[in-house]
Amino acid sequence: MTGEAETDNGKLPQGIKMSRPDWLVVFLLCAISLAVGLYFTRRASRTGASGYFIGNRSLPWWAIGLSNTATYQSGNGGFVMLVLVFGLSGNWLWWAAWVIWMPLVALLWAPMWRRMKIITTAELITLRYGGKPARLARKVYAFLLFCFAVIIVSYITGFFAKTVAPLMPLRESEILLLFGGVTAIYTIFGGLLGVVFTDVIQFFILFVGNLVFLFLALSQHGGWGAITQRVLLARPQAMQQFPPTDLIPVMTVVMLVIQGLFFAGSPTAGEGMTAQRFMGAKNERHAMGGQLFNAFLALSLRTIPLIGLGVICLSLFWTKELANQVGAIPPGFKMIADPAYAWGELINTCRLPAGFVGVLVAAEAAAFMSTLSALINWGSSFVINDFYRELKPTASAKSQVFISRLTTLCLFLLAALVAVFFVEGMVSWFLFINSVMVIFILPLAWFRFFWWRFNVWGELAAIVLGLPLSILFWFGLGFEHKPFWQSTGLLFGMSLLLLTAIALATPPESEETLVRFYERCRPPGLWKKIRAKARLSPEPEPSLRHLMASSLLGILACLGLVVMTNSLFSGQWLLCGAGALAFATFGYALLKRMFTPVLTRASSDE
């Protein structure tokens, strides 16, 4: 049975009637998630906010990698949607930035987040800057990131509801109540440990479920050769592996590459749930190893079944946008009003074993729940660590955990309301969430850690102006209907110039504050004056030159990995082999450097 396309009045497609085995599988996922989350209730409650939000700094590298990858997934349908709308080259709308920021975060930021021994990224502000302005900036930044969490939760909730709508005879509010409610319960009680280890189980559910589905769908739609032939006849450019294309101009790719260099400062990347797990790592090595493992899983392994499913959708479905651009629907293609429905509509085209629709709904739910749990735990951490603990510094561990759980629940309810009433247009929201919303604050990633002269006034300017300007440009001034690079380029350029000018026009932080920060964080870069006055242990540290060389190796390894991955589907086997060779060669060189005794930091860093 196939679901009806969305009508002009916004009606969601009608779901198939899930069988009893399907519902049993879905409820089994919910029961497992609840059991794992509740198992960690006692451990999350022992040491107050520290145990609840950073797991008593006990996370191993493999759990960090699997958990972060599951957290990034948010929905299987998102990747399918990108391929349907943009073709294979659509993967570069996120790869172009990710192949840069992921290794940079592993080698530069992960060890710094761990060694500062803080609970939230907002806490960094009162460590990096001093006085009343720093305390104000910390609270403003904590509030900003709480708002980010609400917006992101709203987006992924709206997307999840659209993705499973063709499969489940439930309204969006009912879908949210079922899966969101279960997630909120185990997150409220289990804290970060419950979130992370539930993520690990959910990652395997979502990956294996979609991999099996890929093979079933391939066999029922004529095999890979017939599928790609239909795509090439209807949309030959869709199988183009690299941009630029008509839909992805070269300036968009350039802007994404620039963004990748700074994305360590994004709440959706290196300074968000990712950083929270680094702070909870056993040590710096586990933080770095977890992020490198995450890079392999996130850039390639998790995407393989989803890209394949996206190509199958290219051979079956047509969208309103394509009809407007190309004209008539080719014979044999079905019109779907919203590309967010593609994953669910594909399931409806296949004959599946009893209970397997439930497996696929569980796989999509696992992706949603893993991201939702991480976001509501992360978002509530700012309320507790950066507001409540300052208001009540003598509060007991039990009180801290109780308020943490109450805040987690409130964040979820607020985000649910936003999702139901405001989130529409999934492609537009995908670009806004992942790029536009964070672009103005991205220069902070480098300014805070690598330039001693940057001060709290530049920080305040970024965090006060960032989100309002992003919303104004994208939705208010209509940049969502213009080339993507225009809005991001304007916002990024404005930020870079404004923050630099403010920092130079206002007094620097006190030497005492800067020395305190340097001793805790030990950042590389423009710190020669401060480094000379810091009291550091004699342990050797990597020089800036060593870190830059390692970062380049990491970027080249990740680039080879994604080229290899996309080439599997474009059929360019020589390029696939070259990508695999680059991944193996540069990856091996990077790991060898990481486990070789480090070079002493040289004075030539500056």
Image: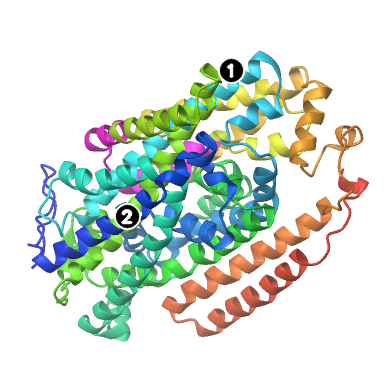
Q: Residue at x 86, y 46 (%)?
A: 605
Q: Secondary structure at mark 2?
A: helix
Query: Relative to 503, is 177 on the left or the right?
Result: left
* Magenta residues, start to end: 414-439
Residue 249, placed above or below residue 206: above
Q: Residue at x 69, y 72 (%)?
A: 586
Could you tell me residue 69's position as x and y percent?
Answer: 47, 58
Q: Is residue 381 magenta?
A: no
Q: Quadrant of residue 198?
A: bottom left
In depth, the one of 403 and 525 nearer the eye is: 403
Q: Quadrant of the C terminus?
A: top right
Give the residue number, with chain letter if any, for mark 2: 35
Residue 195, placed above or below residue 489: below
Query: Relative to 249, is 184 on the left or the right?
Result: left
| Residue 324 in sight in this render | no
Give the residue number, with chain letter if any, for mark 1: 136
Q: Residue at x 58, y 27 (%)?
A: 462
In depth, the one of 143 and 397 nearer the eye is: 397
Query: Relative to 76, is 596 on the left or the right?
Result: right
Q: Residue at x 21, y 60 (%)?
A: 26
